[in-house]
Amino acid sequence: MIPSADITGLVVAGGRATRMGGVDKGLQAYRGMPLALHAVLRLAPQVGEVMINANRNLAAYESMGVPVWPDAVADYPGPLGGFMAGLERCETPYLATVPCDSPQFPTDLVARLAASLADADAEIAMAATRDDGRLQLQPVFCLMRTSVLESLVRFLHAGERKIAFWARQQRFVEVEFADPAAFANANTLDELRRLAAEG
């Protein structure tokens, strides 16, 4: 078993949120609190430490009480830029990542990813759900060994951006979760309102 104290959690909130009109997605209100704060509070009991990856409004994120790190790579390289920032700052052997816009992710997410990663002796464990019978990766929900940083740096500097493509180049395991709704995310303000009404 991997102790939770050996895992740092990272809330990825560094995107441009173009489908949300360019607002800072992690700061949008969900049930009276910013989305990113929901993610921090849900992730914190599952890991030893939590940090946030953000590229705008850093003071607002810092007010959530955890360290905040911007991308180490310019021009918004997507979630992998956040992964890289987290891996560079991580002081534990493992990093668990979640997006800022899925406030109902499983409360046993990290424990299940950790169990599968250990069982498979993998470097990366990634959540997946069934969609019409097909297993679909939830690529920002993953647990990785911090030793993958070097490979990620090479991947990003080669101009690549796809999380699953990079993950499959490592020792990789998919971890199936039964409830796809737990991974529902808000890409638009309408989706955010709907998510708040449903949950």
Image (cartoon, rainbow, N blue to C red):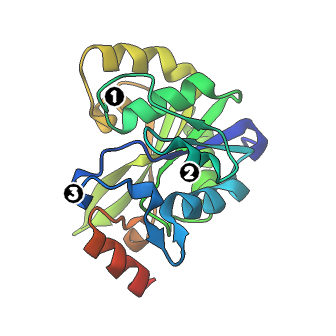
Do labels 2 and 3 touch, CB within 8 Å? no
Residue kind at label 3, given as amino acid type: Arg
Q: Is residue 82 above or below residue 12?
A: above
Q: Is residue 136 left or right of residue 57?
A: left
| Circle 2 residue | 60
User: Where residue 189 appears, x then y in whole percent?
Assistant: 29, 70
Rendering quarter of residue 42:
bottom right
Q: Secondary structure at mark 3?
A: helix
Mark 2 vs 3, N-terminal side: 3
Mark 1 vs 3, N-terminal side: 3
User: Where residue 103 appears, x then y in whole percent?
Assistant: 49, 66
Of 166 and 49, which appears nearest the observer? 49
Binning the other alpha carbons within 10 Å of mark 2 as few (below 14), some (14 to 19) or many (20 upward) gives some
Rendering quarter of residue 188:
bottom left
| Circle 3 residue | 19
Give the residue drawn at x 28%, y 32%.
Answer: 165
Q: Residue furthest bottom?
A: 197
